């Protein structure tokens, strides 16, 4: 594909569309940890950006190497996203309900949970490898980097909004954040069938 306006517009649009799940999870993370420092926010946004760039490239590689295996795995993607986001969201809901009457501590988003969130919100981006299959390696990498940059910016905005609103919601933030994650998992699962 030629590196013109259409390429950049398509890559930016693709990045914005793929980043919506990561934006919602970033919002939930900001709600859950309203005292989050800027360095950690960049780390979270960077993690989501990394996985949003990695998955389309893995899809592209699969298309160019083992297409038949990728197509059979593609049916599992909604189930994996539902399970991962449902588990994390359910845990947040449980903790929020269990600690509803206790003084509010702001639980921190751990590294392991962040990795699971990054994978769960970006696993559907594997199928983007199908849409960029005609790109050469350089164009595919450039598109993945644009997707990562767009995701990074969108996730930072989600974290900032969540952090600001999280201080106002105090004790309900964990419940609200957990519900958001479960809804995202259900949305990924349901939209994959329709």
Image (cartoon, rainbow, N blue to C red):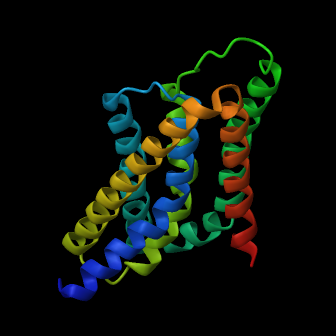
Identity of the residue drawn at 59% across and 33% down: 168
Q: Nearer the viewer, residue 134 or 165?
A: 165
The image quadrant where one finds the N terminus is bottom left
Percent of width and height locating residue 34 = 50, 29
- Most extreme residue toward the top, as rendered? 103
Q: For this rendering, which residue is in front, 174 or 101?
A: 101
Residue at image position (38%, 66%) is 61
- Please tell me which residue is depicted at 47% across the width and 49% down the height of the picture: 158
Residue 27 higher or lower than 170, as above or below: below
Q: Position of residue 151 (x, y in %)?
A: 38, 57
Q: Is residue 34 left or right of residue 43?
A: right
List x then y, in percent, for residue 184: 67, 55
Foreground residue, 4 or 133? 4
Going 58% across and 20% down the picture, which residue do you hit? 106
Which image quadrant: the C terminus? bottom right
The number of discs equals: 0
Q: Quarter-wise, where is residue 59 in the image? A: bottom left
Q: From this viewpoint, is residue 1 visible? A: no
Residue 174 shows up from this direction? yes
């Amino acid at each position: 594909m030629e590196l013109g306006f259409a390429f950049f517009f398509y890559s930016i649009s693709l990045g914005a569309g793929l980043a919506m799940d990561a934006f919602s999870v970033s919002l939930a993370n900001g709600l859950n940890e309203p005292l989050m420092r800027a360095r950690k926010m960049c780390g979270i946004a960077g993690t989501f950006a990394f996985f949003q760039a990695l998955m389309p490239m893995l899809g592209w590689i699969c298309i160019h190497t083992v297409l038949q295996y990728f197509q059979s795995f593609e049916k599992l993607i909604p189930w994996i996203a539902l399970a991962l986001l449902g588990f994390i969201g359910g845990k947040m809901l449980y903790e929020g309900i269990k600690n509803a009457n206790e003084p509010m501590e702001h639980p921190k988003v751990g590294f392991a949970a962040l990795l699971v969130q990054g994978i769960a919100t970006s696993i559907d981006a594997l199928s983007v490898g199908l849409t960029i299959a005609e790109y050469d390696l350089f164009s595919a990498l450039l598109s993945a980097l644009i997707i990562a940059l767009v995701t990074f910016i969108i996730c930072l905005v989600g974290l900032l909004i969540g952090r600001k609103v999280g201080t106002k919601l105090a004790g309900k933030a964990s419940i609200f954040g957990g519900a958001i994650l479960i809804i995202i998992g259900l949305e990924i699962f349901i939209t994959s069938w329709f």
